Image (spheres, rainbow, N blue to C red):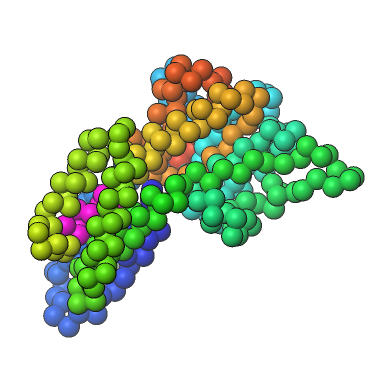
Amino acid sequence: MEHEYSEKAQQKQKKRQLQSNNATHHDSNPLELELEKNSNSVTPADHHKKWFTYEGDKEVELTTERMKEIFSNKQPKIIIAGDGHNKPPFQYAKNIPDVNSSFDAGTLQLYIEATDEQINKNRSEYTPKEFMAKPSWFMNKNRRAGIVGWEDSELSNAMKEMFELSAKSISEPEKLTEKDISSFYELHTTAIQHFLPNFKQLSNEFLEIMAKAGSNKELDKIALEMMRFTSGRWRDEYVNPTLAEKIAKHAAENENHTFVVSIGDAHLSINPMQEHLNKMRKKFNFKHQIIFTRDKAPTLPII
């Protein structure tokens, strides 16, 4: 995932570099340069504002008129936007007729970039109040949305902690304890267990990175590679196809439901999640039309 902890670590490291007494005008932060060099932002900027669908395997841009028709045609659909880090996401969805009618009918499914535990702690941070209405004696008793926290709690936490410990091994090596190192190896084992048996290549790559730390467990030697892996690589190669399969299965079991998915925009640009989802159409036999935008703050024409 395009984790916020990645951004915070870069900011912290940049601040340290600027404060360094030995820094010169041409000095560069190696961590910052490495992460910049491996940036996942590969989609042209203008594409982020546009909406698309699929015609067969082809990504097709939607016109305003076609968007108006699709969003009010009462047909099953999966709507995906790059607003996964907004608090709350789904702000644009309140203006889509088919989303509102699906909510009224109790057939709306909201997929949120968070764990179930995070959502349960603070529902308002992840769900607009318009989709939190509870039935009462004078209201439509069907009116509700299914809430799915699509992040795996154990694996997401493992990746986050490994990223932070890797950053610590560079920025504050003197504070890295034996307990930290032991925890790092335990988290690595947890991640490998999630990757196997379906993601053997990714698992092997992760093992190869760890092996470079050597018998002395020198985490600073693998820190940059590990940070790239835990902030981006696993997202692209594991999360995207795994999430696509989760949605595909759910859609196949609920032919008349509308799905609205919030996700970080990077998931829609590198080894795109929506592309995996579209390719799974025949395997799982779901009929929903896929509509998506990479925009972090999606807007809609007046519908």
Q: How many marks?
A: 0
Viewer-proximal residue, 77 or 256?
Answer: 256
Quadrant containing the C terminus in the rendered view? top right
**Residue 166's x, y, as percent?**
24, 62
Q: Is residue 228 magenta?
A: yes
Extreme residue in the bottom direction? 21
Residue at position x 9%, y 59% from top? 215
**Residue 285's x, y, as percent?**
51, 17
Relative vertical location of residue 223 with respect to residue 99 in this rendering, above or below: below
Q: Is residue 110 visible?
A: yes
Q: Magenta segment, principal secondary structure?
A: helix
Residue at position x 64%, y 40% from top? 146
Q: Is residue 33 visible?
A: no
Among the 4 quarters of the image, the one containing residue 42:
top left
Q: Is residue 153 magenta?
A: no
**Residue 229's x, y, as percent?**
26, 49
Viewer-proximal residue, 111 or 88?
Answer: 111
Among the 4 quarters of the image, the one containing residue 218:
bottom left
Among the 4 quarters of the image, the one containing residue 21:
bottom left
Residue at position x 30%, y 55% from top? 187
Magenta-tinted stretch: 221-230
**Residue 299's x, y, as percent?**
57, 43
Relative vertical location of residue 218 with respect to residue 48 in this rendering, above or below: below
**Left or right of 56: which side holds 141?**
right
Extreme residue in the left direction? 215
